[in-house]
Image (cartoon, rainbow, N blue to C red):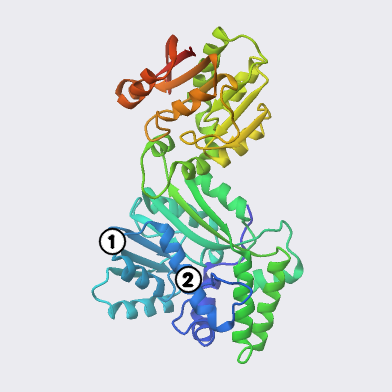
C-alpha cells in the first residue's frame, strides 16, 4: 500500500487558496468537475461547462436517487452539485468537504434554497461524523484522489452506507505501474496526490470492502479533452497553468493518468441479493458484478450441488465422450465436476459474460457462449446433446421454467436432463410443474441433499422419450 506523502492540511490549504482562481476560468459557479463530451473531436472550449453538466446528468441517471434518498456528497466543494441533486430529485443531501472556505460558500448558497433539504459540514473523508448505515447513497466527484488516505476514505464510505446503498463516484486513476518524472512533477505533485489505483485495482479494493461493483467506465479520452480545453481557457490569464494542463494531456496520452467511474452497491448477503428482484439492476449485471468473487464466496457451502448433479448424471450416462450442455454454466463449477469424472465434450452457456470469463480460465469446456435460456440459442441445433444440466438456474428471480421447452428441443431422444433446484422453489412453483407436465420427459430419479448446511435441494433426472 502506497504511503501518501501529502497531508490533509496540504489539500485544505490548496483548495482554500485556489477557489477564486478556478472560478475565473474553470467554472464561475465554483464547480471543479471534468467534462463528458457528446463529440470528442468537435468539442470546443465553449462546450466545456455543458460537458461538465452532462456528466452530472449521467451519474444521476445511474444512481437510483429519489425523493426518499439521503445522499452524502463526499467532497461537495462549493455545494453546487448537492443543491442540483436536491432540486432534481427532492432528496436530502449532506455535503462534506475539507475546505472550510468552500463549506461556508455552500452554506451561504443553501440559505438561498430554504425548501431544499441540505446540510453542509467541514469534515475529513477519512473520519466521517456519521453513524454506520446513515445514507442510502454516497456520491463523489473529482475528490478521492486528494484524500491523504484513500483506502480509509473508501472504508468510511462503506461504513456510512446502509445495506443495499449505492456508492457512485469518479476519481483520477493511474493506468501505468511506473510514473515518469514529468507526470510526477506536473500531475501528482502539483495536485498533491499519490498514484495508487488503476481502473482494475480500484475495483478489486472495492470488492474487498464488500461492494458489488456494478458498472465502471474508463473516461481517459474525456479527461484528455477536458484538460485540452482547460488549457485554452486558462491561457490568457494563467499561461503557466495552461502549460501544466498541456503536460497533463501528455501524461494522459502516455497512460500516466486516467479517469475512472464506478457504481457500487453495499451487499453483505450476496446470495439473497441476487435472488431479490430489483428495478435498478438486472440479473446479468448482478452476476457480472459477482463473477470475480463468486467461487470464493460459494466454494465450500455450494460446490456440493454441482457434484451431486454430475454424480446423478454419471449413474445413467457413464460414457465420457457424450455431448453435454451446461445450461447456466456460471463460473464453471459444473464443468469442473464433469471434467473430474472424465467427461470431455462440454458446452456451456450463461447470461453473464463476466461469469463465463472465469469459466474459460478453467479450460474444461469445449466451447462457452453467452445467451439467454429463455430465447433460442443461436449456437445450438435441435437434438444435438446427449445430456443437459441446469444446476441452480431455475429458481426465484432467475430463468423462467418456459426456458425448459427451449432446452428440451436441444436434447436427443433418450437423452437425459439433470434439473437441480431448491426444494422450496420446486414445491411452490406452479409454472415449473405445468411445464414439466407438458414436456416429453420421464422422471428417472430424484435425490435430496443440502447446500449451505441446511437448505434442501433436489436433483431430478429426466429422460426424454
In the figure, residue 184 lies in which quadrant? bottom right
What residue occupies the far bottom of the structure in this picture? 236
Q: Residues within 10 Å of mark 2 (few under 14, many from 20)?
A: some
Where does residue 214 sit, x and y in percent of width and height?
A: 49, 49
Q: Earlier in the sequence, mark 2 or mark 1?
A: 2
Q: Name the residue carrying label 1.
A: 67
Where does residue 181 sit, x and y in percent of width and height?
A: 76, 69
**On the picture, is 35 further left or further right than 367?**
left
Depth check, front residue: 136 or 42? 42
In the figure, residue 116 lies in which quadrant? bottom left
Q: Residues within 10 Å of mark 1 (few under 14, many from 20)?
A: few
In space, the residues marked 2 and 1 are separated at their CA atoms by 21 Å
Is 114 placed above or below 23 here?
above
Is 111 placed above or below 261 here?
below
Q: Name the residue carrying label 2.
A: 54
In the figure, residue 350 lies in which quadrant? top right
Depth check, front residue: 87 or 239? 87
Could you say whether the residue bearing mark 2 is in a helix, strand or loop? helix
Depth check, front residue: 417 or 168? 417
Residue 400 visible in the picture: yes
> Mark 1 and mark 2 in contact (Cβ < 8 Å)?
no
Could you say whether the residue bearing mark 1 is in a helix, strand or loop? loop
Where does residue 308 sit, x and y in percent of width and height?
A: 51, 15
What residue occupies the far right of the structure in this picture? 181
Residue 32 visible in the picture: no
Identify the residue at image location x=42%, y=28%.
394
Identify the residue at image location x=41%, y=61%.
61
Identify the residue at image location x=38%, y=52%.
161
What residue occupies the far left of the structure in this picture? 115
Amino acid at each position: 500500500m502506497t504511503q501518501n506523502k501529502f497531508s490533509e492540511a496540504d489539500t485544505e490549504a490548496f483548495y482554500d487558496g485556489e477557489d477564486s482562481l478556478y472560478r475565473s476560468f474553470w467554472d464561475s459557479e465554483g464547480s471543479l468537475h471534468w467534462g463528458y463530451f457528446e463529440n470528442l473531436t468537435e468539442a470546443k472550449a465553449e462546450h466545456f461547462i455543458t460537458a461538465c453538466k452532462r456528466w452530472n446528468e449521467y451519474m444521476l441517471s445511474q444512481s437510483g436517487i429519489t425523493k426518499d434518498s439521503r445522499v452524502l456528497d463526499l467532497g461537495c466543494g462549493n455545494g453546487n452539485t448537492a443543491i442540483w441533486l436536491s432540486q432534481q430529485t427532492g432528496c436530502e443531501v449532506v455535503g462534506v468537504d475539507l475546505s472550510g472556505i468552500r463549506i461556508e460558500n455552500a452554506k451561504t448558497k443553501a440559505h438561498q434554497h430554504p425548501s431544499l433539504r441540505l446540510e453542509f459540514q467541514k469534515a475529513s473523508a477519512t473520519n466521517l461524523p456519521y453513524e454506520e448505515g446513515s445514507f442510502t447513497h454516497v456520491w463523489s466527484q473529482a475528490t478521492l484522489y486528494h484524500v491523504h488516505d484513500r483506502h480509509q476514505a473508501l472504508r468510511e464510505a462503506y461504513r456510512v452506507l446502509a445495506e443495499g446503498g449505492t456508492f457512485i463516484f469518479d476519481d483520477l486513476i493511474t493506468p501505468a505501474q511506473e510514473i515518469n518524472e514529468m507526470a510526477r512533477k506536473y500531475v501528482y505533485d502539483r495536485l498533491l496526490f499519490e498514484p495508487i489505483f488503476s481502473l482494475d485495482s480500484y475495483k478489486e479494493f472495492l470488492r474487498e470492502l464488500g461492494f458489488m461493483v456494478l458498472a465502471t467506465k474508463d473516461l481517459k479520452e474525456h479527461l484528455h479533452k477536458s484538460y485540452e480545453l482547460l488549457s485554452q481557457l486558462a491561457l490568457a490569464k494563467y499561461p503557466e497553468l495552461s502549460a501544466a494542463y498541456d503536460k497533463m494531456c501528455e501524461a494522459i496520452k502516455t497512460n500516466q493518468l486516467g479517469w475512472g467511474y464506478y457504481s457500487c452497491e453495499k451487499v453483505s448477503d450476496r446470495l439473497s441479493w441476487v435472488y431479490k428482484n430489483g428495478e435498478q439492476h438486472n440479473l446479468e449485471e448482478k452476476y457480472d458484478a459477482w463473477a470475480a468473487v463468486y467461487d470464493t464466496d460459494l466454494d465450500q457451502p455450494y460446490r456440493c450441488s454441482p457434484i451431486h448433479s454430475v454424480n446423478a448424471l454419471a449413474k445413467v450416462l457413464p460414457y465420457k465422450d457424450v455431448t453435454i450442455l451446461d445450461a447456466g454454466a456460471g463460473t464453471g463449477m459444473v464443468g469442473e465436476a464433469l471434467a473430474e469424472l472424465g467427461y470431455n465434450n462440454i458446452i456451456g452457456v450463461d447470461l453473464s459474460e463476466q461469469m463465463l470469463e472465469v469459466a474459460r480460465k478453467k479450460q474444461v469446456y469445449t466451447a462457452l457462449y453467452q445467451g439467454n435460456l429463455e430465447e433460442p440459442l443461436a449456437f445450438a441445433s435441435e437434438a444435438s446433446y446427449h445430456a443437459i444440466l441446469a444446476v441452480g438456474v431455475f429458481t426465484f428471480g432467475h430463468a423462467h421454467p418456459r426456458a425448459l421447452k427451449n432446452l428440451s428441443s436441444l436434447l436427443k431422444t433418450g437423452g437425459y436432463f439433470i434439473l437441480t433446484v431448491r426444494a422450496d422453489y420446486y414445491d411452490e412453483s406452479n409454472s415449473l410443474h405445468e411445464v414439466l407436465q407438458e414436456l416429453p420427459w420421464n422422471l428417472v430419479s430424484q435425490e435430496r441433499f443440502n447446500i449451505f448446511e441446511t437448505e434442501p435441494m433436489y436433483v431430478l433426472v429426466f429422460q426424454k422419450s
